[in-house]
Amino acid sequence: MEARYAFRKSQLLDECQVAPEIFEQVIPRLYTFMKPFLRIFHGQAADQHAKTSVGGLLSNVERTNIASIASRFGPSRLPLQSCIGWDAWDDAPVREELRGQVKTHVGQGDGVLVCDPSGFPKSGRESVGVARQWCGRLGTVDNCHVAISLGYVSSKGHPLVDTRLYRPKAWTKDTARLAKAGVPKASRADRTRHQLALEMLEKNGASLPHRWLGGDDEMGRPYGCRRRLAALGEQYVLAVPSNTSRRDVEVEPPA
C-alpha cells in the first residue's frame, strides 16, 4: 500500500474510534427503536428472542448464526432458533412499519427508489438460494446468496425499504431441496431478479413519494422490465450494458 493511502487509512481508523460512554444508552435506544416492530410477536419469550437475535446481528460475534448468538448472549439455542427460523410469524407487519417510518421521516416528493441486487458470500449449499453465481462483493462467480433490495433516497437519508431473496433455477426446479429447506409451497415459483424488483415496486411504490426509479445495468438490461416501468407510469434512470442495441422505431429495421 502506498504511503499516502496508508496514512489516510490510519486517519479513517482513528475517526472510527468510539468513546465507551457513547455505548451506555445503545441497548435501551435499540429496544426503543425495535418496539413498533415487535408487535407481531406474541408473548414475552418471543419478544426477548427477537431482541436477542437483533442484538446478536449487531454484535462482534465472528459468525452471526443462531448458535453463535445464543452462545454469546446466553439463551438456549433451540428456543431462539425455533422463534427465528421455524415458528409461524408474518413479516408483512414488519415491512409495513418500516415503510411507514421511511415515509414519515425521510419521504420527499422528489425522492428516488433504487433497485439493486447484492451478493453475500456463503459457505455450504443448504441455505435457501445459495449457489455459485456472480457476487459483486467478491468481483467474481462464487458460492453466495443474492438479494434484490429496494432502497429509498432523498435529501433526508437513504434507508433500505424492502428485500427479496433470489433463488436460481437450480433451486426452483428441485422441489425436494425446497421442501428440505422449509420454503413454503406458495413461494416456490421461479422469479427473475427483475420480477422480484417489480414486485417490490408495486408493493411499496404507491406508499413512498418519489419522482424517479434508478438501478444498475442488470436492472436496465431487459426490455420487458423497462416496458413494465413505463406501463406503471414510472420515470426511471437505468444503466444498460455497453453493447445494448438501439434504433429508431419509426424507420425500417436494418438487415
Image (spheres, rainbow, N blue to C red):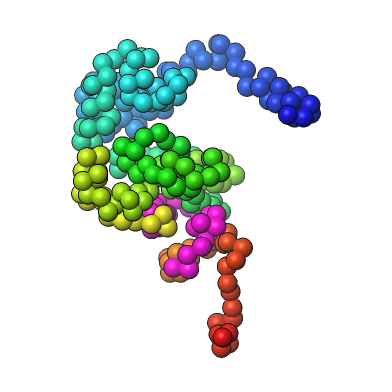
Q: Nearer the viewer, residue 197 or 34?
A: 197
The image shows a total of numbered marks equal to 0
Q: Find the magenta span and give its range.
A: 195-224
Is 24 left or right of 187, judged from the image as shown? right
Residue 25 visible somewhere in the drawing: yes
Residue 28: image quadrant is: top left
Q: Main secondary structure of the magenta part?
A: helix
Which residue is at 34% across, 15% downward? 71
Q: Residue 179: image x %, image y %?
A: 21, 43
Which residue is at 62% across, 17% downward? 17
Q: Position of residue 13 (x, y in %)?
A: 66, 22
Can residue 162 be seen by looking at this rendering? Answer: no
Query: What x and y, as percent, mark residue 139?
Result: 56, 43
| Residue at the image position 33 percent from the left and 24 percent from the top | 66
Picture quadrant of residue 31: top left
Return the x and y of residue 88 as percentages of the image width and height: 20, 36
Q: Magenta stretch containing residue 201, yes or no?
A: yes
Residue 231 falls inside the magenta stretch: no
- Residue 82's place in the image compared with 143, above or below, is above
Instruction: Note whether 100 is above or below 191 in the view shown.
Output: above
Q: Quadrant of residue 228?
A: bottom left
Q: Residue furthest bottom?
A: 252
Q: Residue at x 60, y 66 (%)?
A: 243
Q: Nearer the viewer, residue 139 or 43?
A: 139
Quadrant of the frame with the N terminus: top right
Q: Is residue 27 above or below residue 108?
A: above
Where is the C terminus found, in terms of image quarters? bottom right
Q: Nearer the viewer, residue 183 or 204?
A: 183
